[in-house]
Image (cartoon, helix red, strand yellow):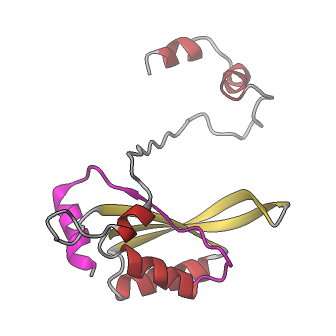
């Protein structure tokens, strides 16, 4: 962050946005604040690795904490999936975040669709059932179901995730 003050010092709003985006200035109604989300990935991070290797070397079940992401076409689908995951014990919590726009290639065609994001807190032990439940309820032919390990977090919260998942 040491370089940020030098970048911003004396810069106009238009100059600042050009410096960040190397493109035209944002419209006047654009916010002045900039948010930053950092997700640290450590190998192996693929949930498939956890699903296929769910036992630790000592034979105990995998208590890895996971943050799973799943995009849905609308809030109704997201709510239906989130409710089922939590009531069935496949997730401790699922946040529903509306207002996404996804840009992707599907069947040799560029697509751009509004979507809703589910942020799902679960464990490596509960991941296979969570994935299966999402696939059963999701209307997409190929739903986005990915997970990253949670390396750090409030101990009591992580314990709660374990206690709420099967």
Residue 7 placement, left or right of 88 = right
Q: Nearer the viewer, residue 102 or 5?
A: 102
User: Which residue is found at the position 61% from the left and 68% from the top?
Assistant: 116
Residue 20 placement, left or right of 37 = right
Q: Quadrant of residue 77?
A: bottom right
Residue 119 placement, left or right of 20 = left
Residue 41 in the image: above or below residue 148: above
Tell me the quarter of the image containing the C terminus.
bottom left
Query: What are the residue bounds of the magenta stretch?
Result: 138-165
Q: Position of residue 61 (x, y in %)?
A: 21, 72
Q: Position of residue 29 (x, y in %)?
A: 72, 41
Q: Nearer the viewer, residue 55 or 136?
A: 55
Tell me the quarter of the image containing the N terminus.
top left
Q: Nearer the viewer, residue 8 or 73?
A: 73
In this view, the residue farthest toward the left is: 58
In this view, the residue farthest toward the right is: 109
Residue 40 in the image: above or below residue 50: above
Q: Is residue 59 magenta?
A: no
Residue 38 in the image: above or below residue 134: above
User: Which residue is found at the position 49% from the left and 39% from the top?
Assistant: 36
User: Which residue is found at the position 38% from the left and 69% from the top?
Assistant: 52
Q: Position of residue 53 (x, y in %)?
A: 33, 67
Count of labels shown?
0
């Amino acid at each position: 962050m040491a370089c940020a003050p030098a970048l911003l010092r004396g810069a106009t709003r238009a100059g600042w946005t050009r410096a960040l985006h190397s493109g035209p200035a944002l419209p006047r109604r654009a916010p002045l604040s900039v948010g930053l989300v950092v997700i640290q990935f450590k190998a192996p991070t693929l949930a498939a690795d956890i699903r296929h290797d769910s036992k630790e070397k000592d034979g105990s079940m995998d208590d890895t904490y996971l943050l799973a992401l799943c995009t849905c076409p609308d809030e109704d689908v997201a709510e239906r999936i989130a409710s089922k995951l939590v009531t069935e014990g496949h997730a401790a919590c699922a946040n529903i975040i509306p207002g996404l726009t996804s840009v992707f290639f599907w069947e040799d065609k560029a697509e751009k669709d509004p979507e809703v994001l589910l942020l799902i807190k679960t464990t490596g032990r509960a991941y296979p059932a969570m994935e299966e439940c999402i696939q059963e309820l999701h209307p997409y032919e190929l739903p986005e179901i990915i997970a990253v390990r949670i390396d750090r977090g409030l101990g009591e919260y992580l314990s709660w995730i374990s206690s709420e998942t099967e």
